[in-house]
Amino acid sequence: MNKYITEAIGTFFLVFTVGCTVIHGDVGVIPPIAIGSALMIMIFAGGHISGGHYNPAVTLGVLIRGKIGGGDAIAYMLSQIVGAAVAAAVVGYLKSGLQTVIPGTPIVGHALVAEFLFTFALVYVVLNVATAKGTQGNSFYGLAIGFTVMTGAFAVGGISGGAFNPAVAIGITIMGLSAWSNIWVFLLADFVGGLVAGLTFRALNPGDV
């Protein structure tokens, strides 16, 4: 089950990033960089659990290669489809009736979702690449963590401001980049995102606590 949940999470963030950067977004280099980065960080984070497919075609190839069984392959594909469908629904919510957000004055509901999701992603990646036994001794953890923040900034920076960090939220508020009346949005979403990521790591890595 842990492998399937990992595939759903990874596919979710891949498709979520596609939607956030392509729908109503500027054409250019940002969407491809963000999308490729999303795939990279999720492979770094979940590769030691599921192999990091996040793509039914990849799963089919691995099946033909003989590195996964038929039952697992079907479960992988279903998990990937569920992750993609949930991502599409969340993007639909965040992008519905989207108006220009003035820096420092986010739409509360949208900002809560955006901050929660990418704080979850950030902490999920940190825990998996910097603390997990399966990735112990790796040399890519800094790259994975940094690119998670970059991907989040590209994907939802225009929605929430892209703090993903209570300390950053406090800093930008002191600097006048965000109103004090909005500080609770960042603190609530970011702490809950970190909490859920920690619980998710413990659930997916039961022997690594």
Image: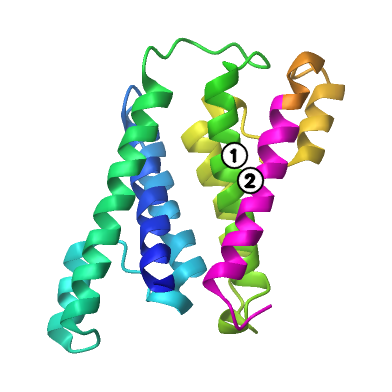
The answer to whether mark 2 and mark 1 are in CB contact below 8 A is: yes
Q: Name the secondary structure under disc 2.
A: helix
Furthest residue in direction left, as rendered: 64
Image quadrant holding the C terminus, namely: bottom right
In which image quadrant can residue 8 be found? Answer: bottom left
Range shown magenta: 185-209
Q: Which of the labelled discs sits on residue 193, or is there none?
A: 2
Callout 1: helix, strand or loop? Answer: helix
Q: Is residue 95 above or below residue 137?
A: above
> Is there any visible trace of residue 18 in the rendered image?
no
The residue carrying pointer 1 sits among few (fewer than 14), some (14 to 19) or many (20 or more) residues within 10 Å by Cα, namely: many
Q: CA distance from mark 2 to mark 1?
A: 5 Å
Q: Position of residue 151 (x, y in %)?
A: 50, 45
Name the residue tied to disc 1.
116
* Residue 127 as seen in the image, left or right of residue 72: right
Q: Quadrant of the N terminus?
A: bottom left
Q: Is residue 188 magenta?
A: yes
Which residue is depicted at the point 66% across and 71% down? Answer: 130
**Residue 42 in picture, x, y percent from top left:** 45, 61
In the rendered view, would you say 43 is above or below 121?
below
Please say whether residue 165 is visible from this viewpoint.
Answer: yes
Give the overall secondary structure of the magenta segment.
helix
Residue occupying image coordinates x 38% and y 12%: 97
- Residue 184 is a magenta residue: no
Residue type marked 2: Gly
* Above/below status of 100 relative to 12: above
Q: Is residue 167 left or right of residue 23?
A: right
